[in-house]
C-alpha cells in the first residue's frame, strides 16, 4: 500500500512571545487548518511559536517546564483532533544538578495528546542564544499508522550536515526544521533545504517564521524539498499555512533505485564508508590551528569586533 501523509505547515509570527498570546494563536491556526478541505494528519509550527515566558514574567526569559502548563494545553489540541503535532519550539526551563538551565526545545505530541519526545536544540545560535544550553540527543519518532519516521532539528542545526545525516542514518525519511531566520540570510540559506534533501534522499522542510522578532525581522520563505532535491513549495514573506500530501514511496524508491533512478547515495555510502579521522576529536583538526575560540556571549563578540576593527564607531 502506498504511504501518504498529509502535513499541515503553519508559517506564523512569533511576536509577542508570551505563552498566553502564542497558545491562542496556535489554537486559532490549528482550528483553521482542520476546518479546511485538505485536513492534515501532522501539524508543524515554527521556532519559538510556542513562546518564551508567561505574561507576568518580568525577565521575559523564564520559560516553562516540559511537561507543564504549556504542554498540557498543546496536548489537548493534539488529542482533540487526533493528530501528530509539533507546534514549534519554546523555552524549556528545568533544574539539573541544582542548576537552572534553559533549552530551546521542541515538544512532539501524538494523537492521544501525550508527549512522544522532546528535542533540545543541539547547536544554539551563539552568541545570540547565550543563555541556552545545548542539547545532546538526536530525536526521531514514528508515525506508526503510516510506517514513516520523522527526524527533527531546530534552526541553526541545519548548518551542520552531521545532524541531518545522523537523523537519516537513524531511519528518518522526513527532516523537519523550524526556524527564525532573519533578513539577510535568505540568499545564503535558500539552497540548504534542497541540498539536505538530496544528500539524504529525504523530504526536508524548513519552516521559517515571518515578521518581527526581538528587534529584527524573520523573512518567512519556508521551503519544502523532495527526496530528489527539487523544491516542492516555497512560501512568501507573510504569515501563511498550507496542507500538502507527501508520498513516501518517493523516498523508498530513491533509496532503493537511486535518485532519478541513477544516484545511489545512501546505498553507496555504506560501501565507501568515508573515513572521519576527527570524529570525537574535532579540536585536533588542522582547520582549527589558526581559528580563535568562538565568541559565546554578545560581550565577547563586541570585544572581538572592536579589537579587529569591524565595529568601532557608534556603539559603546
Image (cartoon, helix red, strand yellow):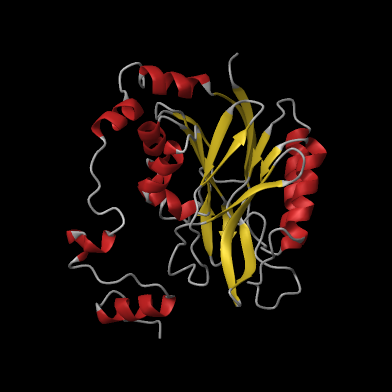
Q: Relative to residue 172, is residue 71 drawn left or right?
A: right
- Quarter of the figure with residue 266: top left
Q: Residue at x 65, y 65 (%)?
A: 52
How many numbered circles are shown? 0
Q: Is residue 118 above or below residue 111?
A: below
| Residue nearest the observer in this picture, 82 or 310 | 82
Q: Position of residue 277 (x, y in %)?
A: 22, 50
| Residue nearest the observer in this picture, 126 or 188 | 126
Q: Relative to residue 190, is residue 179 drawn left or right?
A: right
Q: Residue at x 69, y 31 (%)?
A: 41
Quarter the N terminus occupies: top right
Q: Position of residue 175 (x, y in %)?
A: 50, 39
Toward the top, the furthest residue is: 1
Residue 213 in view in this figure = no
Q: Relative to residue 171, is residue 98 drawn left or right?
A: right
Q: Position of residue 252 (x, y in %)?
A: 46, 22
Q: Position of residue 26 (x, y in %)?
A: 72, 49
Q: Residue at x 43, y 70 (%)?
A: 127
Q: Residue at x 77, y 40 (%)?
A: 112
Amino acid at each position: 500500500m502506498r504511504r501518504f501523509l498529509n502535513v499541515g505547515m503553519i508559517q506564523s509570527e512569533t511576536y509577542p512571545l508570551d505563552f498566553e498570546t502564542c497558545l491562542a494563536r496556535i489554537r486559532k491556526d490549528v482550528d483553521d487548518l482542520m476546518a479546511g478541505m485538505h485536513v492534515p494528519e501532522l501539524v508543524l509550527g515554527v521556532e519559538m511559536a510556542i513562546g518564551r515566558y508567561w505574561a507576568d514574567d518580568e525577565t521575559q526569559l523564564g520559560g516553562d517546564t516540559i511537561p507543564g502548563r504549556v504542554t498540557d494545553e498543546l496536548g489537548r489540541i493534539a488529542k482533540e483532533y487526533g493528530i501528530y503535532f509539533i507546534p514549534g519550539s519554546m523555552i524549556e526551563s528545568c533544574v539539573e544538578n541544582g542548576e537552572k538551565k534553559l533549552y530551546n526545545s521542541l515538544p512532539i505530541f501524538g494523537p492521544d495528546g501525550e508527549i512522544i519526545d522532546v528535542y533540545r536544540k543541539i547547536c544554539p545560535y551563539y552568541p545570540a542564544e547565550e543563555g541556552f544550553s545545548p542539547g545532546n540527543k538526536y530525536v526521531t519518532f514514528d508515525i506508526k499508522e503510516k510506517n514513516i519516521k520523522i527526524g527533527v532539528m531546530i534552526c541553526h542545526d541545519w548548518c551542520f550536515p552531521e545532524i541531518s545525516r545522523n537523523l537519516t542514518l537513524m531511519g528518518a525519511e522526513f527532516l523537519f526544521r523550524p526556524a527564525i531566520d532573519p533578513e539577510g540570510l535568505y540568499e545564503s540559506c535558500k539552497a540548504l533545504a534542497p541540498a539536505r534533501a538530496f544528500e539524504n534522499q529525504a523530504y526536508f522542510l524548513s519552516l521559517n517564521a515571518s515578521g518581527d522578532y526581538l528587534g529584527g525581522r524573520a523573512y518567512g520563505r519556508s521551503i519544502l524539498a523532495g527526496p530528489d532535491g527539487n523544491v516542492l513549495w516555497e512560501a512568501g514573506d507573510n504569515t501563511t499555512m498550507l496542507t500538502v500530501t507527501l508520498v513516501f514511496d518517493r523516498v523508498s524508491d530513491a533509496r532503493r533505485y537511486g535518485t532519478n533512478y541513477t544516484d545511489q547515495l545512501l546505498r553507496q555510502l555504506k560501501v565507501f564508508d568515508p573515513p572521519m579521522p576527527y570524529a570525537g576529536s574535532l579540536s585536533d583538526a588542522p582547520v582549527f590551528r589558526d581559528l580563535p575560540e568562538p565568541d559565546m556571549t554578545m560581550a565577547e563578540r563586541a570585544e572581538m569586533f572592536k579589537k579587529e576593527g569591524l565595529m568601532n564607531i557608534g556603539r559603546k
